[in-house]
Amino acid sequence: MSAASPAPAIRSVDEHLEDVLAAVHPLDPIELQLPDAQGCVLVEDVTVPVALPPFDNSSMDGYAVRIADVTGASEEFPAVLTVIGDVAAGSEGLPTVGPGEAARIMTGAPLPPGAEAVVPVEWTDGGTGGGAATTMRAASAAPEGATGEVRVHRPVEARAHVRARGSDVQAGDLALEAGTVLGPAQIGLLAAIGRGTVRVRPRPRVVVLSTGSELVQPGEELGPGQIYDSNSFALAAAARDAGAIAYRVGAVTDDADTLRATIEDQLVRADLLVTTGGVSVGAYDVVKEALSSVGDADEPGGGVEFHKLAMQPGKPQGFGSIGPDHTPLLALPGNPVSSYVSFELFVRPAIRALMGLKDLHRPRVRAVLTADKPLSSPAGKRQFLRGTYDAEAGSVTPVGGAGSHLIAALAHADALLVVPEDTTVVEPGSDVEVMLLG
Amino acid sequence: MSAASPAPAIRSVDEHLEDVLAAVHPLDPIELQLPDAQGCVLVEDVTVPVALPPFDNSSMDGYAVRIADVTGASEEFPAVLTVIGDVAAGSEGLPTVGPGEAARIMTGAPLPPGAEAVVPVEWTDGGTGGGAATTMRAASAAPEGATGEVRVHRPVEARAHVRARGSDVQAGDLALEAGTVLGPAQIGLLAAIGRGTVRVRPRPRVVVLSTGSELVQPGEELGPGQIYDSNSFALAAAARDAGAIAYRVGAVTDDADTLRATIEDQLVRADLLVTTGGVSVGAYDVVKEALSSVGDADEPGGGVEFHKLAMQPGKPQGFGSIGPDHTPLLALPGNPVSSYVSFELFVRPAIRALMGLKDLHRPRVRAVLTADKPLSSPAGKRQFLRGTYDAEAGSVTPVGGAGSHLIAALAHADALLVVPEDTTVVEPGSDVEVMLLG
């Protein structure tokens, strides 16, 4: 009879995390349009197909000239050149610049044949016959600028103001290596080398559902004995924050058949399932009831195990895989702070593992405890207290108490203080481990 | 004649940023569904409407009892109580616990009338008549657990394992103050106190368009003199990263009418417009041509001014407002690295200002320059070099050169080195300012 069965072994936080991470593998890669790949991990080494820039081009608005024609030019004795036309960026058909000639050229436009350098417009009269120019007039308003004569006031060296083909990257260069996370600059580089799509691990789809017959949707009226569902909102937001596509399924009532049916329904869009509540030792702990009763590992709950963890908050936890695709499922406790802390410790690393990220964990630092009185912590349990971290002072201050229901304090915390299993008292001024919630 | 007009005054980076931030105001707040408010700034002080928890409830799965009935109870001499029923979380109609009676109670369920404390199931026989229980059997499988007798092995104090009404927050308490950024924990708290919607500043809609007749969509074939459009991809991604809803309009050809029409089209969905290219002194600089020629401040371009900034890269910049709603527009230079650096310096703070965030800027730190040779920087210009920052060593190493076209280097940088206007040489080992790109 299970009510009298021997107490199951207590499991450490590290054992549970190890178990989760051993079972969660990076998602299979897919080819995504570049904008959709933002935040994803590249799975291929991307090499440069064509040199960048792909052709010699001007780095200034000015005149493409031959060196010999401007040797010794000065404001007093300008070189007078015949303007043979405009070379704008993207213009087709380049004029050839012969002796005594110049082509008016725009930034990014290809250096035309015959030309050896570019003279910036500010070093010329801009074709106006006046003093030094500061700008060109728009070609649409003043088409005559593409013809006539230009006076060049300074000589230039060969290749001056010319960006050489391949000066940024050469064809065959490694642009980005597999494992790179695609942020804006990496997306810019991929676009620049002409990649319209890219092979990445997709964002995991995480289905979050809370359980509890007492739960009411925020915005509705509370009846006696009812509370608002906050877990599905907080954890869907946290999953999104971790990089996932989160689907929030509202609260499911404490009925095993309903829960099983809901989970089966959701499997089609889940790479990871997260439930809250119903994992402890009560007679209405529906997640445990629904998922520990299935013998076939291919059925929902077939592979889900429930444990007591040596931690506070967050003692009761379930983990396993469900359904024909063995979709991983984490069953977190129902208390809002317990579920949030559990998410940070186990679900967030799982999401990041599914994404193929190398860096799975929140940063941890050491800090000096600032507190009025010593903190007490239960022996044999790793305690996670909410706190605020002051990077400049290198200190951390607890917010709220140790009770696992202090959701208000959680909303004012930016860190978790980690008190090890063998520590029962932490004196103010002690050095403690802090997990930064970012 | 503009080609011979006096050179416009050079503007400092700080002047330009000040100008941008003076013109960009937080967006008007709207009421959003809680999940849609993630990452947004709250504009109201939110007070707690009902105490949390809203009623005295059990923090354990166990038995709700009267203190006197379990005084002196031990495993050898248990208190034997009559189980009068189950109180599950969310169950309606509470039984009254009389002398000699106990109600089986679940975590989160309301403490029934008459009961003064909760005895955890592990301190009882769980109603089995055997030794200490470790769990309850599911009520669906073993309904007899809600009846019969329970042996209690330990006494409890009044209110033991009871979470008092209001022990987390009291009605009228300030839950979150205006200005709070809504992350997962804040969304959890708002849900917990019953807020289905919340008043926040919305994410700004940022329209990004690149200009240039030479630009080709990545994935297509390059013709002679053409390059791939990367700016619209990189900056839309960067805008999204900064918190905006980004709309990427492909590359617009260098034609003033087309550009004006495109901008007018886009105004309807823009809280901020960002263009790249066409802002310098060339004859085909379409953004400048299209937007500086309009006299009426309510017409597109009516309020856009173009400047030369004392910075490298990113010298030519435009800023102003356009259209009937005076939508802010930032016209960035077309070079990919110039536009990216300009985005970081001017657009990202503008997006964050539109969101109503207080903290507009990237973190800046001091670091020691690690380099083979001194860096040179033009006099009178603030230079922004790409680099990698090593937090542990407190050092920064330049990536690529000073050329503004090194988009490959940008994709491997995580920081910008800031070289002040009056510095022309930075020796290795010097202390430099670093802007972390995060």
Image: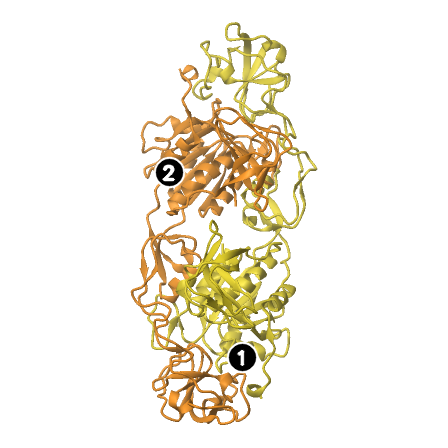
Chain colours: A yellow, B orange
Q: Are marks 1 and 2 on the same chain?
A: no
Q: Is residue A99 visible?
A: no
Judged from this view, the residue extending furthest toward the top is A77
Do callouts 1 and 2 mark residues in contact (Cβ within 8 Å)?
no
Q: Is residue A129 left or right of residue B299?
A: right
> Mark 2 falls on what kind of element?
helix
Circle 2 packing at 10 Å, graded few (<14), some (14-19), many (20+), is: some
Quadrant of the rendering where the N terminus of chain B is positioned: top left
Measured in 3D between alpha carbons, the distance from the residue under mark 1 to the one under mark 2, in whole angstroms, is 57 Å
Residue A350: horizontal and vertical position, in percent? 58, 61
Name the chain under label 1.
Answer: A
Circle 1 packing at 10 Å, graded few (<14), some (14-19), many (20+), is: many
Q: Which residue is mark 1?
A: A289
Q: Is residue A61 visible?
A: yes
Q: Amino acid at mark 1?
A: Glu
Q: Which residue is mark 2?
A: B21
Q: Relative to the observer, which residue lies in front, A109 or B95?
A: B95
Q: Relative to the observer, which residue lies in front, A332 or B361?
A: B361
Residue B216: horizontal and vertical position, in percent? 57, 35
Quarter of the rendering containing residue A70: top right
Q: Which mark is residue B180?
A: none
Q: Amino acid at mark 2?
A: Leu
**Residue ID at (58%, 82%):** A7
